[in-house]
């Protein structure tokens, strides 16, 4: 009963427009409070007031901070840095400040979104990419998730199970870009997380796409196109690295993929696995902040009536 009510809330929020969102979120908070056994203040729901989103429509060039440029194709829309961080806050998430934008498609049935972040970690060496052991990397990912599960279970939440690679990591040395995909399961809900990294002189861009496993074949072309359309600006490129003056990252590519960099504050592992499961609409026990984060995917499916000027990421001049 509770599960169907949550699904109804998410669906009606997607169909009823932004004017109804506040009421839906209030009900969702109430349902979640009953599920997790904790009190929920009505004022918490009142604080969440999503507004119309100032999408930048493709085709255009969208700035990713002062680091890179995204050639946004037709059929895609981009939300700038400031608006992305604000949206994440409204949905109950905790943006790190590294978010540069959010991308989604405007077509029917597109149930995914991609968050773009820039991590100022320094120059990430790629010399180990030629010797990757996919099995060892997956073992490290599962080990890290097991540690997280101990904390989740202590708080009364079911564990996450990493199913395995949906696409093993591969590195394009000419473009200095990495792609991999992992599927994860919680109870009967299965999601996929598509990860990409674009390496630069002073850090890296993380383009993280979340969606359901059943839509994997649809997600893959989007990932390839968007990653190919991102380029660092002159002076910020990987090949611009100066070994005498530039900072070198404390971790390499393997550590980033395996999630070991979480301990260094470079990645947020749970984001990669929880959001797609929420999008599947089959959750029973979930923190309010996570459930509201899942609602973001529903909001992003709303099509804008007209092109609006963006902020944060902005149009290139």
Image (spheres, grey):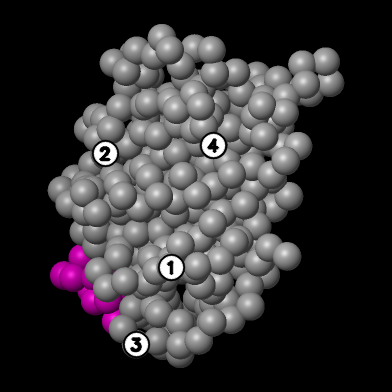
Residue carrying label 4: 198
Residue carrying label 1: 74
Residue carrying label 2: 183
Foreground residue, 48 or 62?
A: 62
Residue 279, given in percent of the width and then of the height, sits at 30, 59
- Crowdedness near tag 4: few (<14), some (14–19) or many (≥20) residues, C-alpha within 10 Å: many
Counting residues from the start of the chain, the first of labels 2 and 3 encountered is 3
Residue 245, given in percent of the width and then of the height, sits at 84, 21
Residue carrying label 3: 16
Gap in Å between the C-alphas at discs 4 and 1?
22 Å
Counting residues from the start of the chain, the first of labels 4 and 3 encountered is 3
- Label 2 sits on a secondary structure element that is strand
Which residue does the image show at 65% across and 57% down from the upper left? Answer: 63
Foreground residue, 84 or 309?
A: 309
Above/below status of 212 relative to 256: below
Q: Which residues are magenta?
A: 1-12
Counting residues from the start of the chain, the first of labels 2 and 4 encountered is 2
Residue 97, given in percent of the width and then of the height, sits at 67, 51
Counting residues from the start of the chain, the first of labels 1 and 3 encountered is 3
Counting residues from the start of the chain, the first of labels 1 and 2 encountered is 1
Which residue does the image show at 53% across and 41% down from the upper left? Answer: 206
Q: Nearer the viewer, mark 1 or mark 3?
A: 1
């Amino acid at each position: 009963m509770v599960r169907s009510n949550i699904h109804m809330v998410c669906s009606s929020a997607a169909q009823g427009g932004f004017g109804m969102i506040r009421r839906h979120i209030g009900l969702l908070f109430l349902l979640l409070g009953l599920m997790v056994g904790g009190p929920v203040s009505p004022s918490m729901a009142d604080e969440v007031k999503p507004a119309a989103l100032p999408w930048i429509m493709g085709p255009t060039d969208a700035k990713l901070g002062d680091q890179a440029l995204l050639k946004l194709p037709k059929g895609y829309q981009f939300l700038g840095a400031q608006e992305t961080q604000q949206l994440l806050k409204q949905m109950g998430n905790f943006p790190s400040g590294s978010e540069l934008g959010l991308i989604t498609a405007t077509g029917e049935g597109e149930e995914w979104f991609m968050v773009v972040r820039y991590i100022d970690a320094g120059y990430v060496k790629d010399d180990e990419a030629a010797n990757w052991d996919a099995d060892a990397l997956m073992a490290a990912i599962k080990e890290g998730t097991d540690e997280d599960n101990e904390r989740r279970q202590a708080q009364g939440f079911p564990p996450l199970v990493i199913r395995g690679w949906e696409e093993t990591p591969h590195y394009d040395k000419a473009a200095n870009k990495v792609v991999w995909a992992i599927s994860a399961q919680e109870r009967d809900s299965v999601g996929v997380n598509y990860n990409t990294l674009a390496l630069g002189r002073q850090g890296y861009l993380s383009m993280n796409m979340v969606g359901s496993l059943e839509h994997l074949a649809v997600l893959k072309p989007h990932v390839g196109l968007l990653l190919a359309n991102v380029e660092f600006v002159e002076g910020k490129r990987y090949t611009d690295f100066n070994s005498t003056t530039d900072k070198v990252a404390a971790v390499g590519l393997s550590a980033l993929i395996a999630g070991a960099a979480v301990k260094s504050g470079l990645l947020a592992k749970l984001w990669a696995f929880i959001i797609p499961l929420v999008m599947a609409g089959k959750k029973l026990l979930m923190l309010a902040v996570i459930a509201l984060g899942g609602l973001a995917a529903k909001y992003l499916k709303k099509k804008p009536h007209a092109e609006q000027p963006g902020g944060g990421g902005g149009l290139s001049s």
